[in-house]
Image (cartoon, grey):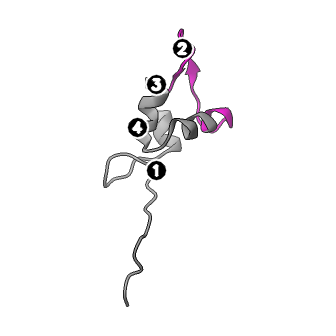
Amino acid sequence: MLTMGQAAKEAGTSKATISRAIAAGRLSATRNDKGGWDIDPAELFRVFPRNPVTGFGNGDVQQTVTPSK
């Protein structure tokens, strides 16, 4: 299980994004004894797929230069 911080790092996103996904019901998580979230890695990567190039992130690639023809 991952903490919210670990999940955010693995997904290449912020803790706020993870929190919003949990609140919206898109990402399943359970409360632990300390009041934090426990997130199953399989569930995390179902919602935020790994980037095959970097190994983390949601796979979105930002284009900064327009390719020439």
Q: Which residue is mark 2?
A: 32
Where, by quadrant of the figure, is residue 30 drawn? top right
Helix, strand or loop status at disc 4: helix
For the image, the number of numbered tags is 4
Q: Is label 1 or label 4 in front?
A: 4
| Viewer-side residue, 16 vs 46 | 16
Give whichever of discs 3 and 1 has the lower sequence position: 3
- Give the amino acid type for the residue marked by disc 3 in the picture: Thr
- Give the amino acid type for the residue marked by disc 1 in the picture: Asn
Q: Which residue is mark 4?
A: 9
Spot occupied by residue 47 in the image (x, y as percentages of width and height): 53, 43
Magenta stretch containing residue 22, yes or no?
yes
Give whichever of discs 4 and 2 has the lower sequence position: 4
Helix, strand or loop status at disc 3: loop
Binning the other alpha carbons within 10 Å of mark 4 as few (below 14), some (14 to 19) or many (20 upward) gives: some
Where, by quadrant of the figure, is residue 1 drawn? top left
Q: Which residue is mark 1?
A: 58
Which residue is at a point 43% across and 69% down the rendered structure image? 63
Q: CA distance from mark 3 to mark 1?
A: 18 Å
Q: Is residue 29 left or right of residue 51?
A: right
Give whichever of discs 2 and 3 has the lower sequence position: 3
Give the numbered dot on residue 24: none
Give whichever of discs 1 and 2 has the lower sequence position: 2
Give the numbered dot on residue 3: 3
- Give the amino acid type for the residue marked by disc 4 in the picture: Lys
